[in-house]
Structures are given as C-alpha cells and as structure tokens.
Image: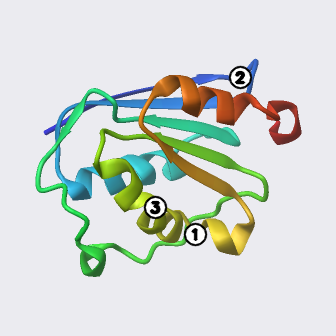
C-alpha cells in the first residue's frame, strides 16, 4: 500500500499530492479521485517520482476504472511526475480518466519535478 501526502499552497493556487512506495495501477486512480473529492485548486501536481510501479506495462486495466463524474474546470492544469518508461504510456489514459477534453483543462506527464513545476507555473495567474 503506497503512502500519500498532500498539501495546498493557496498563495499560488497549487495542490501537491505526493505518493511513495509500491503503487499498483489502481492506486494511481485512487490518488486522482482523492484530489477530485477534496478541497482543490486549479493547479495540481501528482508526484509519483519516488513510487515504484507494480505491473506498469502500457496495458492498464481500463475496464476496471469507474465512470465517476470528474469536474475539471476550464483551464485547470494537472501535472503528473511518473518514472520512466511509465510516463508516456499513461498520458492518454490519464486524460480520459480526468475528462480533460470535455472541460478544456490541461494535463501533461513528466519524468521530473522541475519540468512539471515550470509547466504548471508558466501562467499560474490565469488559473486562480
């Protein structure tokens, strides 16, 4: 079972959710659900950089994902920091799960925190 920590920095409108330990594919989606259920900001960083993915092939279990309503806001920015080679295999699935297309929100996947933070902060004032 992975460990999850989260905090909100209201001064810049950012939620950071950090996950440590062994992570299976469904844990990834539980972390996203945690964000959507809580008090959230329009910028979010999901940090899996210190997580160890179990069974992390490109075939994640799409059929087991719930069809919950996820209310991304227009212009939201979600950055996921995932270990290589997992990161690029998941972008489409994460976009589908977070329903970014329907709400014109933004989501990208990175392999390091620096690039993810730069992307989130490049126009942060527009997302408050």
Q: CA distance from mark 1 to mark 3?
A: 8 Å
Q: Secondary structure at mark 2?
A: loop
Q: Which mark is residue 94?
A: 3
Residue 50, picture quadrant: top left
Pair 1/3: label in front: 3
Whichever of labels 1 and 2 marks the residue nearer the N terminus, that label is 2
Q: Is residue 39 left or right of residue 22?
A: right
Q: Which mark is residue 10?
A: 2
**Residue at image coords 56%, 65%:** 70
Q: CA distance from mark 3 to mark 2?
A: 25 Å
Circles 1 and 3: CB distance less than 8 Å? no
Q: Is residue 69 above or below residue 56?
A: below
Q: Residue 7, can we see it?
A: no
Q: Secondary structure at mark 1?
A: loop
Q: Quadrant of the N terminus?
A: top left
Query: Residue 79 placed where, x, y %?
Result: 55, 42
Query: Residue 122 placed where, x, y %?
Result: 77, 32
Pair 3/2: label in front: 3
Furthest toward the bottom, the residue is 63
**Residue at image coords 67%, 46%:** 77
Q: Residue under label 1, please give it.
A: 99
How many marks can you see? Answer: 3
Q: Secondary structure at mark 3?
A: helix
């Amino acid at each position: 079972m992975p460990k999850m920590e989260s905090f909100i920095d209201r001064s810049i409108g950012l939620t950071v959710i950090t996950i440590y330990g062994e992570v299976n594919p469904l844990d990834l989606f539980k972390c996203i659900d945690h964000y959507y259920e809580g008090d959230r900001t329009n910028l979010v960083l999901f940090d899996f950089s210190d997580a160890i993915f179990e069974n992390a092939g490109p075939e994640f279990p799409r059929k087991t994902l719930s069809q919950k309503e996820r209310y991304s806001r227009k212009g939201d920015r979600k950055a996921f920091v995932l270990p290589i080679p997992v990161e690029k295999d998941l972008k489409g699935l994460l976009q589908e799960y977070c329903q970014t297309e329907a709400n014109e929100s933004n989501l990208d996947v990175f392999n390091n925190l620096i690039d993810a933070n730069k992307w989130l902060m490049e126009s942060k004032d527009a997302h408050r």
